Amino acid sequence: MKGNNHHVIRNNTNSLGAFVKRAMVALFLLIGGICLTSYSYLFQASVDNAPISSNLPSPSFASAGVPERELPKIEIKSCPIDQVTGCQEIVDVTGHGDTVSSLLNANLADERAAKEVAKSLASKIREHTRAPFDENTAIKPGRRYEIVVDGSGALLKASIELDSANVFYALVEDGKLKTWKEEVVLDFKTETLTFNLKGSLLESLLSIGESPELAAKLTNVFRWDIDFQSECVKGDACRVLFERRYADDKPSGYGAVLCAIYEGRKIGKKTAVLFSGEYYDESGIELKKNFLRSPLSVCRVTSHYGRRFHPILRVWRKHNGVDYGAAQGTPVYAVNAGIVSFAGWQKGYGNYVCIKHDNGYESRYGHLQRYMVKVGQRVKQRQTIGLVGMTGIASGPHLDFQLLRKDKHVNPLSVKMVRSLNTVPGLLKPRFASVAGERISALGKPTLIRASGQFRSSIY
């Protein structure tokens, strides 16, 4: 009897021990889950509230007559744009092959939202222009566009200027998408501006009160002759004759750059005169070349061609290209027309695109966030082929750009740009000489007003 009682007590003890163990395991899992949830919440909060400076102006919108559409899954803070944490403003001009869809896809994080905005904008454009137009219709090169996104890459505001009389807007407000055409009285005045570089072209123009749009336009004008990141130095001079746009008597962007003269210590003097829709030098030779000077519109050279100490592999080796530092998502352009020979993953280069050109050259683009072309596709010069990223072996976002001639690497920064043989047609040469002479003279001897280290004058 005693033995049996002892046996029962031992069994009860074993059951109690097992129960305690199970309870301790359950408690441990519960505490771990609570900690993990708290950590995830705190981490997300720290990301969402990361301070990024922004000086975007608060927009004012006339709600009367502006159609609204429900836009699912687009989150937007209910406060003015200039108070939204992490705002980013993209201001540029279109390149060959750009569409409303490609511009929004390249700059918005949510592809579904980008598609919805593109369709709505295209519909509004079609309604007012009464011409065949959809989100995949190619826009003429050199057209200004602006896209403003919040810290998560969601749309706040976008605009596209097809011409001075057709400017279209999209705005996301309280989860709803509004699109409309600008209805204002437009006027243009021809002005001149003379300034010296104090940093990059963009920084120099911002310091004298001009906007990124003018920097984008000048970069576009000289895209075959000047790499504004590697060939320009402090003190270089630039003179510009341009149209300033006024909406209801208030400055509202820019029209065409009519003439520009850049004088640099490295590159010498470069002149651009707009005539019959194209830019020519003072001799009437078209500026268009076989290759762009840079595959990016906004960048900085972070590593040159030649032998270098690799920042990640920690060994000395030859660098076959040029590294351009730029923000993730910056559009990457084809430097010349050609056929895509490779588009995919290439070991340390990550997402990689190779383009064979008709003149024996090949260009290569590495570390892309994503590519937007496929093998066998023919691309045009300055067509967007991908976005800057840091895929593969990369210490930060940048583009590794390589140029080959007859299958041998050459320094992209020292290749002589083959000059186009296009000149002003013979019958138009007298007219060109008159226009060029008048515009260059206006820049050479303007009646100038000195203001904050730059010179301005109004011609008309």
Image: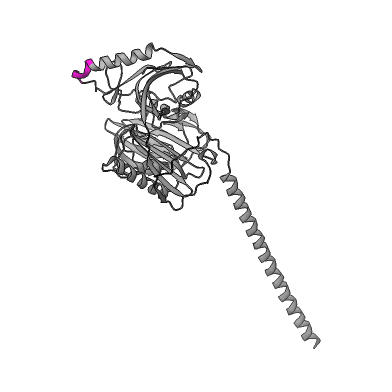
Residue 454, image x, y percentages: 47, 17
Give the overall secondary structure of the magenta segment: helix
Residue farthest along the top direction in this orientation = 445
Q: Which residues are magenta?
A: 425-430
Q: Is residue 11 visible?
A: yes
Left or right, 427 with reference to 41: left
Which residue is painted at 24% across and 23% down in the image? Answer: 422
Looking at the rendered image, the quarter that the N terminus falls into is bottom right
Residue 426 within the segment the image draws in magenta: yes
**Within the image, what quadrant is residue 348 found in?**
top left
Q: Is residue 411 visible?
A: no
Q: Is residue 157 above or below residue 222?
A: below
Residue 227, image x, y percentages: 40, 25
Q: Is residue 56 above or below residue 438?
A: below
Q: Is residue 276 above or below residue 363?
A: above
Compare residues 250 and 193 and report the one nearer the observer: 250
**Within the image, what quadrant is residue 61 found in?**
top left
Looking at the rendered image, the quarter that the C terminus falls into is top left
Residue farthest along the right direction in this orientation = 2
Compare residues 409 and 223 and report the one nearer the observer: 223
Residue 327 within the segment the image draws in magenta: no
